[in-house]
Amino acid sequence: MEYRRGMEQKLLELLEPAFREVPAREANREIARARREQAGGDPDDDDAPAARSYELVLTTWESFVREQLPKLIYHLESVGARLPECRGVMLSLFVGERLWFIDAKLAVARISRMLGVTPGQLSERYGLSEKRTAVRDPLLLMGRNGAN
């Protein structure tokens, strides 16, 4: 796939467990279909139950970890989708002109592995209890040379 050539390797790794990839211009229809599919319903039945979709625009792995990951983990816990299961939630990830859908449980497992932490550590750092640790613990960021 030509468009993947210029994509950052860490983003490719994050997107690997996606269950579907579509053109971003079809986002509204495809997000609705994917939500119904993830909830176990017929993707084409507008009245079928639907999973929650958390949508992100990804540019780089570093900006994802620094700016979006804390918000994602906090949101998951806020809606009761506790880590590591993240029940009822999928991620809709926009990268360039493409859109990927990933079950939140698989995404959290992949992110944890890539960062070398457990889902529990992500939850402790960025979840509902984050205010207790925000001042004393450093962010889970890559080193200056771009490596973990």
Image: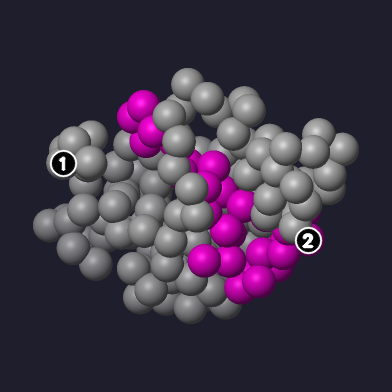
Q: Quadrant of the N terminus?
A: top left
Which label was assigned to residue 80?
Answer: 2
Amino acid type of disc 2? Gly
Farthest residue toward the right?
47
- The vertical placement of 92 against 102, above or below, is above
Bounds of the magenta span? 79-106
Residue 15 is inside the magenta segment: no
- What residue is shown at x 68% (from left), y 35% (from top)? 32
Which mark is nearer the camera, 2 or 1? 1
Q: Position of residue 43 (x, y in %)?
A: 70, 43
Looking at the picture, the colour scheme in use is one colour
- What residue is shown at x 66% (from left), y 71% (from top)? 85
Q: Identify the mark nearer the N-term, 2 or 1.
A: 1
Can residue 129 be seen? Answer: no
Disc 1 designates what residue?
Answer: 5
Which label was assigned to residue 65?
Answer: none
- What residue is shown at x 31% (from left), y 50% (from top)? 11
Can residue 118 be seen? Answer: yes
Q: Position of residue 38 (x, y in %)?
A: 68, 54
